[in-house]
Amino acid sequence: MTGPRLTRLAQTLPSDVPFIGPEEQERTMGRPFRARIGANESVFGPSPRAVEALSAAAPEAWMYSDASNHELIAALAEHMDARPENIVVGAGIDGLLGVLVRVLVEPGDAVVTTNGAYPTFNYHVTGFGGVLHKVPFREDREDLPALFAKAAEVDAKIVYMSNPDNPMGSWWTGREIEEALDLIPDGTLFLLDEAYIEFAPEGTAPRIDPEDPRVIRTRTFSKAHGLAAMRVGYACAAAPLIKAFDKVRDHFGMTRPGQEAALASLNDKVWLEEVRAEAAKSKARIAKIAEANGLTPLPSATNFVAIDCGRDGAFAKAILDALVARGVFVRMPFAEPQNRCIRVSCGSPQDLDVFAEVLPHAIEDAKAAQAG
Amino acid sequence: MTGPRLTRLAQTLPSDVPFIGPEEQERTMGRPFRARIGANESVFGPSPRAVEALSAAAPEAWMYSDASNHELIAALAEHMDARPENIVVGAGIDGLLGVLVRVLVEPGDAVVTTNGAYPTFNYHVTGFGGVLHKVPFREDREDLPALFAKAAEVDAKIVYMSNPDNPMGSWWTGREIEEALDLIPDGTLFLLDEAYIEFAPEGTAPRIDPEDPRVIRTRTFSKAHGLAAMRVGYACAAAPLIKAFDKVRDHFGMTRPGQEAALASLNDKVWLEEVRAEAAKSKARIAKIAEANGLTPLPSATNFVAIDCGRDGAFAKAILDALVARGVFVRMPFAEPQNRCIRVSCGSPQDLDVFAEVLPHAIEDAKAAQAG
């Protein structure tokens, strides 16, 4: 009996996971985290209107969702100052990235990103046989001109940038991005991931004609809207590219409660303002805790703070490991020299009490480990 | 400005949809359906425990789901008399089919199915460049020996069969399938889609060693469990194949409320029994309505009834169109000669009142159309 025959590409892929989830870490440790501030989730929760929509939709869970995402797309089109033909809804930005890479990237195609930027994008590129070309961060910011120059050099199908950036929290102004657009090489798609845009200062989002064929932007209900569990993201781009998603997307793949919660959340501007205010307070406190421990918080336009631990990647990793071992779920950048930092998501006051309590011990642990 | 460059494969794919959803039809008609009995959804709804789980999970929607699906997989492993390593959870069977085809089928690879069987499977195969080879139904049942013979002839990577069958409602006994397994060619994976198995007579599910490398079976919470909106399906197969899903799946792609509702539903045997009883009653009434109108209901091991309209595909299509125009959402088989039927899903007594009221008029409309 022969087993099934994987594709040549699948044979080369590891059965790896871009991220280990906190639940898996909790099972390994045998106890729950005391503070869950590692995945840039919104601990402030979903809008009360979204919670209401989720509960109201529960008895209707027997019905497949609207495969056209009609109402949500109409609302998002208005939100993005675009036409419905410019919007596609998908299972989070992760899901949308998978579909986008699938329709654009075939084995051997070049794709450009920043070394240490969003790993799940890289996972999709590799998963479809694309070849990643990585540009370093420049002063902890994604290097926009270098990204476009590299894209020209390797004839990239896609060049990826998140703005504001994950994992560093840095950002370009909208105007700077607008001015750089003419550097996009012919035939390269600029994938602008705006997962954290709701937390950024006014003017961080560039004004781009939705019909500009050079750009696609992705956004999500997983971050500021506090609906990570519901898998709702969207992309805005020229109509022909949006239509290409229909070639391969899972048409009935959205959940109905997710659609309804997203719509309710989009209409709750008051909640979004509260979340922004809470996130700002939380970031200020994270910065204060870092400074009180002799570490350097970096400026952030997101809902997390990258904290420079002042030494090398091994030291930051030791602090991170000690935080995790002591019940604080945090993450850190993967690439040098950004891996001198740990990344702490906004938390509730209680979460940050735990962080403040544990961090000095974690630093001691790390120093002891390095000294030993 | 050049637009993005699609892959050669994507350029050949239409921006088509395997199914038009009922909401889209309602928008086109400008009014809601009076009876939604076309998508084999469970109008009897989710288990009250699942509804409770959905509502309870709503405030926690800010947390990404457990990427390992640990608890749900543990429960499903027990349910399937398998190990957790034999189970993968995905965004409905549709989502799982997409991942499975992706890791097995590359452009030009042969895949075998029945002409007129589940179109979304075909959509995925075509979407990854596979070549479909179709075997006809035999007496309205998928032709198991012919499927395996064709798989041997074309050296298929996958041979697909649903049991019980959609859209005909027919089935093989578990013993018949067990006896046929030795006909599976070396290197071909037998994909046994058991979406409707909970409705089938005892003994319809074959006993297959989960570690048998020749077989993968798929099941869902979308049908008997009444959770279509939540996108929860699972597959059971040998551990190496299950592990291959981790190469490309969207690890954080499940919704947390969906995981919890599925778990609650799996543990509610009483509700499942009620749904089975309601479905049996509903099928009996659909059959009676069909007979009262001179049509022939076919035996069904599912939650729908294929009704033989007694003439050709055009006549059945005319009846279907008239039903839809009169507010009854139903569907029909795509391929000859099964397209002499319409397919009516189990409905509530109120749904079937509407069906009973409308069907005679729909038949008149169709006869008039054919006479004209």
Image (cartoon, coloured by chain):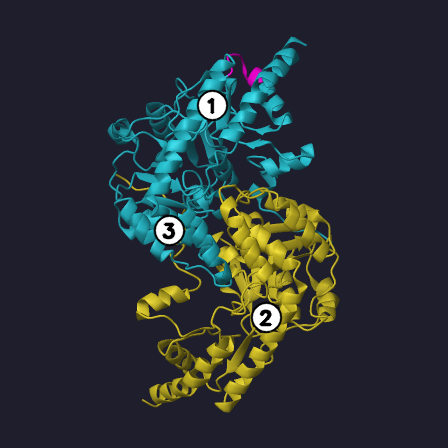
Chain colours: A yellow, B cyan
The residue shown at (63%, 50%) is A88
Circle 2 SS class? loop
Q: Position of residue B109 (x, y in %)?
A: 44, 37
Q: Chain of mark 3?
A: B
What's the amino acid at mark 1? Ile
Badge number at residue B263? 3
In terms of depth relative to the viewer, which is nearer, B79 or A173? B79
Whether residue A44 is situated above or below residue A310 in the rendered picture: above
Circle 1 SS class? helix
Whether residue B242 is situated above or below residue A318 in the rendered picture: above
Q: Quadrant of the N terminus of chain A?
A: top left
Badge number at residue B286? 1
Disc number lying in front (1 or 3): 1
What's the amino acid at mark 3? Leu
Same chain under badges 1 and 3? The reply is yes
Is B82 included in the stretch rendered in magenta?
no
- Quadrant of the image occupied by residue B20: top right
Circle 3 SS class? helix
